[in-house]
Image (tube, grey):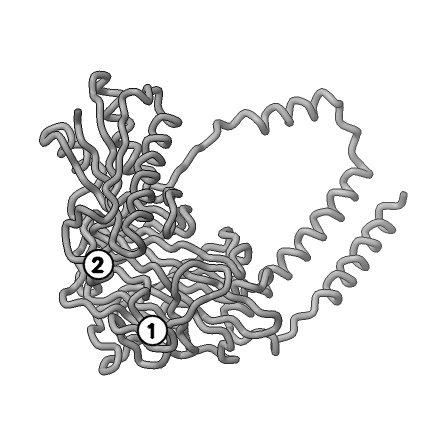
């Protein structure tokens, strides 16, 4: 085939591709989103050109030997496999906890503050109660003291989507602002994370920043998979360092992002956006805990030196013996200690809060202890005869069950050396 003729075909094809990619600015409410779309279009055209050029080059090149292809295939499989796992460990000393169980439906929760509006609701198909926060409203837990510089923050978001209704622009982070009613959050030295357009495969946004500036984004997290599902958010703060985990995956690890003045308040925001979100931001199961001492090392240290140890950093699904993945690193320390000390025999005892009947709580505590034992024996070469289990239900509280924080402390797992 004549080379000039092929080049003409190439140019004509590029023109068709270029004309086919039309951007409609009216669909972009934010400049950043528009830039991302334009970049995708440019990348698409570049890929089209690359394929055409490869085809032309193939017309004028010799055929490669199959042995060459096999060599390249083997070479592509040569690099070593890189493994990574979540290193998040919940703080062991609960500062604030709320699942809105003590709030009436339709009310704004008593342990929270807002500059807008919201209400406690139930969601069909989901356990417990949720706080629904309307458009252009910030909420934050009311705490007596500033946050410690080593802590963990966990909560669940229900990312509701409903046809063509606009979804909330979700933002959360930490800030020096103590009273969101009297101070402007957006002009403070805050760190924030944005989750936006989670129901749009061509527009999902996961970004983070300081004050009002975006400093990075994560485009590889499958945010759209969580539309109409619960997304578990976990944040670990250690002095100037912040780590963000979504559903157990670590997405952000910034060692120099946080300043000491930010440790005053945690906030969630159904951010102002045009068009306004028609769907509220739904949040529940908030847990803020100090992590001044590593929950893992302290657990093993107490067990070996004192003969027993207790932790509320082993978490379970609501009214269930299903262990939350964030608890695995804590339990693994017990497994490793038993491998290192072959003569170590332990008893695992479960404890619950006072919600529900006494009999149900006793059964649940026993099941949770057995679940921890099962995790250890399935993941370590340890005989089940070395681990006994039991449960005491709600009978041995370490603090009052009159608050969400108290209940969180009473929901614990105890390890006793036999």
Pinpoint residue 193: horizontal percent, then vertical percent.
38, 62
Disc on the earlier residue, 1 or 2: 1
Q: Is residue 341 left or right of residue 278?
A: left
Q: Say if mark 1 contacts mark 2, CB within 8 Å.
A: no
Question: Disc count in the image?
Answer: 2
Q: Residue furthest right?
A: 1
| Above/below status of 247 relative to 197 | above
Which residue, given by chain and number where applicable, does mark 2 sit on?
A: 405
Which residue, given by chain and number where applicable, does mark 1 sit on?
A: 104
Quarter location, residue 156: bottom left
The secondary element bearing badge 2 is classed as: helix
Q: Residue furthest left?
A: 306
Q: Residues within 10 Å of mark 1 (few under 14, many from 20)?
A: some
Q: Residues within 10 Å of mark 2 (few under 14, many from 20)?
A: many
Pinpoint residue 143: horizontal percent, then vertical percent.
19, 67
The secondary element bearing badge 1 is classed as: loop
Q: Residue at x 30, y 20 (%)?
A: 385
Q: Residue at x 60, y 65 (%)?
A: 38
Pinpoint residue 415: horizontal percent, then vertical percent.
21, 34
Quarter of the picture containing the N terminus is top right
Between the C-alphas of marks 1 and 2, the distance is 18 Å
Q: Residue at x 54, y 58 (%)?
A: 224
Task: Out of 70 and 394, give the one closest to the viewer.
Answer: 394
Task: Out of 333 and 410, give the one closest to the viewer.
Answer: 410
Quarter location, residue 122: bottom left
Quarter of the picture containing the C terminus is top left
């Amino acid at each position: 085939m004549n080379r000039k003729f092929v080049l003409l075909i190439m140019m004509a094809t590029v023109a068709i591709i270029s004309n086919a990619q039309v951007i409609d600015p009216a669909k972009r409410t934010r400049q950043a989103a528009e830039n991302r779309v334009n970049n995708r279009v440019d990348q698409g055209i570049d890929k089209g050109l690359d394929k055409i050029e490869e085809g032309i080059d193939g017309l004028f090149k010799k055929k490669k030997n199959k042995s060459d292809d096999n060599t390249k295939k083997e070479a592509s499989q040569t690099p070593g496999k890189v493994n990574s796992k979540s290193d998040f460990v919940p703080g062991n000393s609960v500062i604030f906890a709320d699942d809105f169980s003590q709030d009436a439906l339709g009310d704004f929760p008593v342990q929270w503050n807002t500059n807008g509006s919201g209400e406690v609701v139930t969601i069909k198909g989901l356990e417990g109660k949720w706080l629904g926060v309307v458009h252009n409203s910030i909420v934050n837990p009311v705490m007596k003291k500033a946050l410690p510089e080593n802590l963990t923050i966990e909560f669940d978001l229900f990312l509701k989507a409903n046809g063509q209704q606009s979804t909330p622009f979700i933002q959360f982070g930490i800030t020096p602002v103590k009273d969101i009613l009297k101070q402007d959050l957006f002009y403070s030295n805050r760190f924030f994370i944005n989750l936006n357009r989670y129901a749009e495969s061509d527009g999902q946004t996961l970004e983070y920043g300081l004050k009002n500036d975006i400093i990075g984004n994560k485009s590889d997290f499958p945010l759209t998979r969580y539309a109409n599902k619960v997304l578990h958010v976990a944040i670990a703060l250690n002095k100037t360092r912040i780590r963000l985990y979504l559903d157990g995956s670590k997405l952000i690890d910034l060692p120099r992002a946080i300043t000491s003045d930010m440790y005053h308040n945690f906030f969630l925001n159904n951010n102002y956006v045009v068009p306004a979100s028609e769907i509220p931001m739904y949040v529940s199961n908030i847990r803020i805990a100090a992590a001044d001492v590593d929950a893992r090392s302290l657990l093993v240290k107490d067990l070996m030196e004192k003969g027993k140890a207790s932790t509320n950093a082993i978490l379970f699904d609501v009214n269930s013996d299903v262990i939350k993945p964030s608890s695995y690193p804590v339990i693994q320390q017990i497994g490793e200690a038993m491998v290192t000390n072959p003569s170590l025999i332990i008893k695992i005892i479960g404890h619950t809060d006072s919600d529900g009947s006494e009999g149900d709580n006793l059964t649940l505590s026993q099941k949770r202890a057995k679940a921890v034992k099962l995790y250890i024996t399935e993941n370590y070469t340890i005989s089940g005869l070395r681990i006994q289990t039991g449960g005491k239900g709600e009978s041995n509280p370490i603090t009052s069950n009159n608050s969400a924080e108290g209940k969180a402390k009473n929901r614990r797992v105890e390890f006793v050396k036999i």
